[in-house]
Image (cartoon, grey):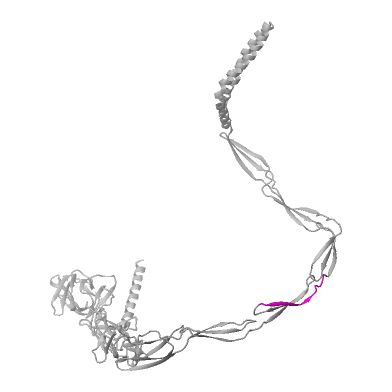
Amino acid sequence: MKIKKKSIITGVFSVLLFGLLIVGLVFLAPKSDNTYTAQASTTPSYTVIMNGTYARANQSNGYSKEIIDAEEFDVNTGLSANTRPARLYLSGSYTNGSTGILYNKDYINFSDVHFTSSQSDFTLTIYDEYSASVASGTGSVSASLSDGLYKIVMSYYAKSGSGTMQFQVSFSVYCYFTVDATGPSISGASTSQTGTYTNQPFTVSASDSASGVGNLFMRSPSESVFRSVGSTSKTVSRGNANGRYTFYATDKAGNSSQYYYVNFDDTAPSVSCTGASFGTNTNDRFTVSASDNSGSAKLYYKKGNAAWNTSGSSYTVSETAAEGIYYFYAADDYGNSTSEMWVQVGAELSGKFVKSDTDNSVFFTWERPSWTATLDGEPYTKGTWITDEGEHTIKLSSNSKSAVYPYTIDHCFVRSVEKPTCTHEGYLQYNCLQCGYSYTDYSIEETGHYYVASTTVATCTDGGYTLYTCTRCGDSYTDNYTNSLGHNYESAYRPANCTDYGKTVYTCQVCGSSYYETDGTLPTGHSYTNEIVTAPTCTDDGLRRSTCEICGDVFDTPITANGHNYNITDSASENGQTVRTYTCTVCGHSYAQDLGDQYAEVTNYVEYLFEQYEPYMWWVLLASAGVWSIVIGVMIAISHKNEDKEKAKKMLINYVIGLVAIAVIVVACPFLIRGIASLIT
């Protein structure tokens, strides 16, 4: 598992190093032979490449060697061959788990450093470019450094034994490195998007006092991504895309500058005129507008030799503005400007007559409010209707000139037409809407009738004729009468059938009219045979169809459903509850009936009867005993009358027995039945 995990980590690390190599080839300029950059994208743990000397000696001999670009070397621990490795590591303010290599004279882009030696008794010292010690420690050393050149020195000295067994070892190795935690600076551009505007060619330069500029990147207005444009500077000349250029630079330590901007525009604004045209005369309202691809165009205007004014990107000259020549030009924030353009206002007099839509009256109108007019020598108000027929003259005047406009108003006739008819002539009526004059033109002759003939052919019962109708007025007359044709009958005998008598039918071969005569043969009546179409079931009706064997007449009759024929097929009792099952012998349908507790129902019914009888029980006893006493008393009286004492004595005994029997039947028996019913439940 450890071997597999190590292989995976090694593969991932190889892919990361390959990706960093590709990025470096694409975006970074090649390094000089003596300059290196720490190979990690963030702050990793670096293995430091060391240079220096190593020496060991005893009383009989000594040994020394140069340490050159070494990641690791062995240090003897005594006279024996035992050694321990010497390595030096650098980590920044945090470590992300990746590793890199810090070469001699390399650059790092973080200021908080922490050096660690592979052995806790090695001395570590950081020196600045003036060889002054910045920080020192044993086994490790930390410092917060400003930008500049530094040297890390790892040293060791040990001595042991005495005499011929004396041994000493020492080494001092170093690595120069430059701290560059500050990004490059850029000149010729601004960190504000609206800070720099120019219409001239411009150059943007990058500089870095520590590790030096690695690359300068630019994104033009027509591009969506940055591209490398060199290591230190880029010049944008005229003819390139107008808009905002964005720059940033990277140094050889991997720091990036912030974004810098130059707004470049070498194109002059455009000027347009609506309501008029530049270089022409107008008396109408017009508007001049300026626009620019930068969005910052200003329009300047003046009248004649007056001073230039501005009012944003547009200016409107109204129809009431003073006459004269108006000049315009536009400029943008970049210093680009257009040539001057002009429009002359009120140089030529211009007026026109407007005719009414309903008659020949007119009114006169003109464009500029400062102009005046007369009608036939009298002052005229603009837009007043002129209705008098005859010749008129309008004189239009300005401050410097005048113009004459003649006009003639004729009658304005409205024509009405009286159309001619077949028997009367028509005419044209002309009426002047302005003065009321009228005249009539009787030049339309009567049209005469225009008859169209329509013939009605004679039938078996009606005669024929020709109808002549005028298509203009509807007048008509009838001519060319003919007699009716009469029927042409043919006879056919039809024998009696199930529903009809035997008869002879007479039919006209021309119009189809018919009648018949019976011969007295009676209808035969239907002869139906029955067929069961659908047999009835226990729940559904059936269908019987009857068909006449003679004429084929058919009708259907429903057959009522048979209904179920149930038999008791099962009966079960449990805890006094009885359930009985009924099954149809025809279709097999079955259902169960829960009869409940039969004994309880009998007891409840007996109790119900007793409750109904109990209020009257004693009255029934008294009534029965009274009737029995009367009967026996009458019989005893008769026996005494007949002097049959023996019979009277027997009657008295029967009377007592009868009272007992009545009491038993009327009182004892109901209580007995009630008690028995209570016991069985």
Question: In the image shown, does 357 or 12 lie closer to the viewer?
Answer: 357
Q: Is residue 451 above or below residue 3?
A: below
State which quarter of the image contains the C terminus.
top right
Any part of residue 397 in sight: yes
Q: Quadrant of residue 514?
A: bottom right
644 left or right of 440 in image: right
Is residue 341 shown above or below 669? below
Q: Nearer the viewer, residue 75 or 375?
A: 375
Residue 498 in the image, given as x and y percentages of width and height: 81, 56
Q: Residue at x 64, y 13 (%)?
A: 632
Viewed as shown, does residue 512 lie left or right of 391?
A: right
Q: Is residue 240 above or below residue 508?
A: below
Give coordinates of residue 570: x percent, y percent.
63, 39
Q: Quadrant of residue 483?
A: bottom right
Q: Is residue 634 left or right of residue 611?
A: right
* Residue 484 falls inside the magenta stretch: yes
Q: Picture coordinates of residue 398 (x, y %)?
A: 31, 91
Residue 33 screen position, x and y as percent:
25, 85
- In this picture, is 434 found above or below 126? below
Q: Which residues are magenta?
A: 474-487
Note whether residue 232 is visible. Answer: no
Q: Which of the pair 109/588 is nearer the observer?
A: 588
- Tally the numbered discs: 0
Q: Quadrant of residue 166?
A: bottom left
155 displayed left or right of 604 = left
> Residue 339 colored magenta?
no
Q: Assign the N terminus to one quadrant of the image.
A: bottom left
